[in-house]
Image (spheres, rainbow, N blue to C red):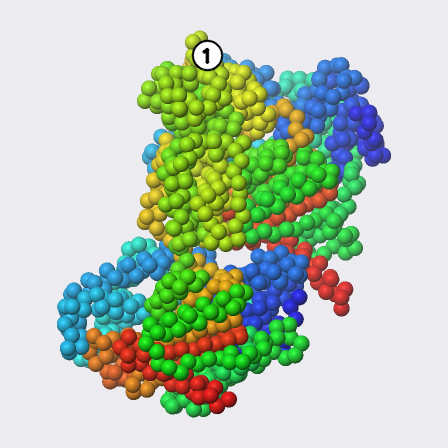
Amino acid sequence: MFKPRPGQDEVIAYRGGKMGIAAVPGSGKTHTLSYLAARLVASEDLAEDQEVLIVTLVNSAVDNFSSRIASFLREFDLLPGIGYRVRTLHGLAFDIIREEPGMAGLDNRFAIIDERAASDILNVIVDNWKRTHPDFIQAYTAENQDPERLGKRWNESLASLAGNFIKQAKDYELTPEMIRAQLDKEKKAGDDFPLLEMGYSFYAAYQQALGFRGAVDFEDLIRLAYRVLRNNSEYLQKLRHRWPTILEDEAQDSSLIQEKLLGLLCGDDGNWVRVGDPNQAIFETFTTAEPRLLREYLQREDVVPSDLQYSGRSAPAIIDLANYLNRWSQEQHPVLELRDTLSKPYIHPTPPGDPQPNPPDTPDNIIIYNENLQPDKEITLVANSARKWLAENPQGTLAILVPRNARGAEIVEQLTAMKVPCLELLRSSKATRDAAQVLAAVLGFYATPSSKRKLADAVLAIGSLRYGEKVIKPHSRALRALVNQQEAPETLFAPSAEIPLEEISGPDQLTPEVLFHQALHELRRWQGAVLLPIDQLVMTISMHLFTEPSDLALAYKLAILLGGNAGLEPNAQLPDFCQQLDEIAQNRFRLYGFSSEETGFDPDNYQGQAVISTMHKAKGLEWDRVYLLSVNNYDFPSAQPQDNYMSEKWFVRDRLNLEAEMIAQLKALAVHDRLGMRQPEGRATLDARLDYASERLRLLYVGITRARRELVITRNTGQRGDCTEAVPLAALRTYLEQQ
Amino acid sequence: MAEYIYTEQQTSVIEAPLPGSIFISGPAGSGKTSAAIGRLERLLAQVPGHQILVLVPQRSLGLPYEKFLRENHAYRGSLPSIITLGGLARRLTGLFWPLAGKAAGFHAPHLPPYFLSLETAQYVMSRVVDPKLEQGYFNSVTIDKNRIYSQIIDNLNKAAVVRFPLTGIAQRLKSDQNLDPSMLPALDQTQQCALEFRQYCLEHNLLDYSLQMQTFLDHVWPLPLCQDYFHTYFPNLIYDNLEEDVPAAHDLLRAWLPRSQSALLVMDESGGYRTFLGADPISAQSLSALCQQQVQFNQQEEPAQPVQALNRALGACIRHEPAPPDNPDFSPALTLTDYRFYPEMLSGVVARIRELLDTGTASAGDIVVLAPYLSDALKFSLAQLLQEQGIASRSARPSRMYLEEPAVKAVLTFAKLAHPAWEMSVSHFELRDALMLALPDLDIIRADLIAQTLYSPHARADGLKSFDALTNPRMQERISFAFGKKLEELRAWLVNYAQADPLPLDIFISRLFGERLSQKGFGLFADFDAAERIAQLIASIQSFRQFLSAAYDMDQVSAGLEFIRTVEAGLLPAAFMTRREIPEDAVLIAPAHSFLMENRPVTVQFWLDVGSLGWWERLNQPLTNPYILRREWQPGTAWTYSQDFEANQEHMQRVVAGLLNRCRQQIIVCSVQVNERGSEQRGPLLQAFQTLRKRSFSAREDARV
């Protein structure tokens, strides 16, 4: 049973109204919120047709919440799975629209394009636009650069610009037509806004492309859901009844439209609990997140504020260091505008008797390496240190956290060369699973079972699905050889054949034989199902093959699709269905695209290995020993004159941050701030530096608070050798030295 | 039934004075049918058997009576008629045809009538509908054309047994406010097709069920001669499960009762599972007042208190009523388990069945696994797991396309092989599948090798070549001599057959199945389900053949060919009941509804997929609506969203109560968080279970305080 600590008890006693909770890292907010959700579900106040609605940031959190609530409900002897709904904002918006697509002007079978398809569309648009607007490129390219030779860079940069412009416009509920009308007005007044004109062109062309495909994108989902609810009060009332309480996690990353949508769903007298840590708002740069929204919410009169300030995660010294960073930034940060970056509450170690006591301090459990290392030296240093530590602590967990993906790849290379077991938690290193492809391989074997190549294909496909493509790839040649050696594979498919079923504890014990045997068991088991109608065959296989809801959903869609085709062409046979599957697999339409690659990651499952991740991806996770790399003034700038900024491209005139300039104008346009639209060029670039510096400061805070027992921070000179120690790091180092 | 000890109440029914009429009502399992059988036994001692009519709404519901007669060795007289209203109508219409045919509007009343089965009716319907499909009819609905036929037929039948004018179908259906307005033209088209079908039948002396009922009710039964005949021949009447019958049957009863010497009417209060087929428990209940004596059965024949307590508690949750006061503890009767995924659930179920068998808690025949729908994937996976444990299983489910039945496909493939003159192609895959089914334990690779090396789809006339003719010894070795030998046995039979004159298809299949496939050493040996499907197929072909030769003058062999074409176009089989007894050593895997129609109690029930909406919502049938086509329906009123909702709610409640009334010991409820479609499950039945749990949770919390 869950034993709440101070603060947590206040939260779980919540029964209604509006509450805002500031939670420090490691304070168990997911656990507390899940428990609260389970309590609310168990309450008889919640009618059968009602659900507690939990809104989280990412899909992995959806799974995490769902399984925690389920386990609490089991403890209460209730059935998990009903009485609550855990969704990302996109998932929620999708639910709202799917129920009443007509209200959103959509057909019953509207499609949602995923980010990859969206970026394909944008690339084409950007390329066309660039070719018809050579003047723009010329005008914005830095003086000493040749625009002709910057083709790829401009394309990448503009595509990213276009994507963010469209996202932001949708967040502000601006349609291309609204922007056009405003720009036309300005034009009449004699003013031109080339950046906004460009943004408009991208946006208009993009929406047209979506319309042509009968599709919407993720941002549209939210925008449309909001519009539907605002315009249809009966439907809104129905949903308000259905979801009497909204629990929102990671509220510091909420965007304006998210706040508006949930606010509308909740209503003035509704029940809404928002939990977040404003100090961990690190998604501003990539998304439309606005951390100030949570701060403002916490201060509202109708909101009961609460905090979760006890954390049993880290050793006292590490907590102290994180708190010092917080205090220093409030009191001593050299840039006044950045002094509100971090705020209270401070982290407190758990009180005595808490089920999760803080790990004890050990001598020198914090090391801030005071040397400006060459980038490769930094890598070698960290890799050696990690190897040594892992050898001494085989049961321990260790993470190497980097600010950017590219740096992670370098450290992985080094560790691999040193034969240190390691695992990437980078962008989406997990093999992209393709249900259609795996099914096509399995059916392909059943279509031509005497072909050894098809047998090997099917075995590899099943293996890749289970262990990931990366793990399987090194075995593929040996496996094909093994299959080819089989003189009479049919004997393996006879019911009397005894095939060993080896249990292995990890992918490192995988051999081609094990792979082959495991897959044989499956292939043998399903062979009788080939007599069933094609949709049932696909469902029989997928039922056993897939465990991800998204894969099951996809397989189900494929089954229905093939079943439908079979109805249309009664003479279609297995090879025809395989071909159809192949076509689908190649032209992969990701159905709802909701479950992306992320899944729940538990560092404790990777003892004795080095986990390499970006600091962003590490959010919510914890390890015994944590390395933070590249803490220099390039990756962690502080709005100092000597700092460099990634978003200020070297090939752009005056090193303008074009995105910041354009978004600033868009924001002004959205609120009809004509003066704001005309602010001098470069001003937004400077403002963006502040935003970026403050987000990076919070990122450092997040990085530090990932460590349970030991923390190592290093820095480097950067590729050009001109980077220096980040300002906050210097402050931390000095503090530590004085201790 | 010497060993059966009747309760006092049952005895009073059995011994009630003759003549006389009695109406028994009560829940399932209260001993009503046993009492009725007791009364039948007493009747048989006093009157000749043929003077007794046992009327049931569906043939399967007559099984207990048939079983009694079969086992009652002491009885040597003539046999009672156990029959449905449709059967009776057909019998009497056939008899009085010369007097009624003309009045009923048939164009050739001097010629004999031809009664259509559901299957032959579909065939005739296709002749009406198909040309219209080409003109763009039914464009606004996206359903399979076989479903169009069957839904139009359904509408015709409802009009006949509910007794509303055939011309009123579209108007009634249009009162469904949940329909998208763009679908309305399809309802007019339905109406038009129904009328044209009727016209076609009248022109060709064809009587589908609806016309048979209408002719009987309007033109045959009103004949004084017919009534005299009926009452002379059937002065004694037993009518069981009348709540599952149609209003027209109840109307007739009203006419019969005053003249019957003895009548026993039996009604299951919680029944009404066939309402979507036109059953009308309300008009059934109204017959009570016409009987001299009314008896209410309450006591459970076999005490199942925790189950009944569960029935009350769960019923209250479904109806959103407060928990029944002083309800005994139902926890021994209920196990709730949730799983994340389907395979986990299936393994869990099988492990539990194993345990039940090992501990002697229940025998296999006393265990049922129920789901709202039974997909092939579910059935295959579950049956396979059970088989691995050495547990036999069988399934019962409503009809679906013949084409989807592997056993049917296999025998039809062999039929095509045996009749090269038909020039119907057999593909590599059809042959491979048929071989896998016919030869036990034949794996897919060997089956594929056989189909590759011994058959060429392009040289149809050569048929299946001999295994011994294989010149490649390595290939012979791979296929193996054991399978080669089995294959030869099968082939020899086919070759032998082909040397004589072709037989009608049903006889061919009957022989192939009897002489080879069902024999020991072949794939369908002791396969209950396949045997049932094949028996159904044979009966179906037979009726098809007779129909085609009578109505279209087709020769017997061509009729077989025409049947295969119809099957390949997606023919839906009629409901079918074998005379076979329910095997006692096999676990039943069935949709809940099919189990209810077996009308027998079991010890343990597994309910799978309780989160599925299938427990609640009715099948989506855009061209018909069982509620609007009911008798109580007031023409002109609208069928709204909330009525539809309530109807579903009521339906679920009825099914749940029916299942619990047929359970002696335990319900094991299984839910999956992510179903085989990858979506979350949160249907109303699961919600009701959650409420049940919540109530226990609150009660425990209260007790703690």
Mark 1, residue position: B497
Residue under the image location 35 percent in, 78 percent down = A373
**Type of amino acid at the residue the image marks with label 1:** Tyr
Instruction: Give the vertical position of A401 relative to B698 (above or below).
Output: below
Residue under the image location 26 percent in, 77 percent down = A720
Q: Position of residue B251 (x, y in %)?
A: 64, 32
Q: Nearer the viewer, residue B402 or B430?
A: B430
In the image, farthest residue toward the right? B8
Q: Position of residue B53 (x, y in %)?
A: 69, 23
Q: Chain of mark 1?
A: B
Q: Is residue B587 left or right of residue A255?
A: right
Do we see residue A264 in this rendering?
Answer: no
Residue under the image location 37 percent in, 62 percent down = A417
Dividing the picture into quarters, in which one does residue A724 lie?
A: bottom left
Q: Is residue B661 left or right of residue A364?
A: right
Q: Nearer the viewer, residue A228 or A19?
A: A19
Which SS class for mark 1?
A: helix
Instruction: Give the vertical position of B677 relative to B150 (above or below).
Output: below
Instruction: Give the vertical position of A302 relative to B26 (above or below).
Output: below
Do we see residue A37 in this rendering?
Answer: yes
Instruction: Give the vertical position of B29 relative to A643 (above or below).
Output: above
Dividing the picture into quarters, in which one does residue B476 lie?
A: top left
Q: Position of residue A239 (x, y in %)?
A: 51, 63
Q: Position of residue B150 (x, y in %)?
A: 48, 33
Q: Nearer the viewer, residue B599 or A552?
A: A552
Q: Nearer the viewer, residue B305 or B379?
A: B379
Quadrant that contains the N terminus of chain A: bottom right
In the image, farthest residue toward the top? B500
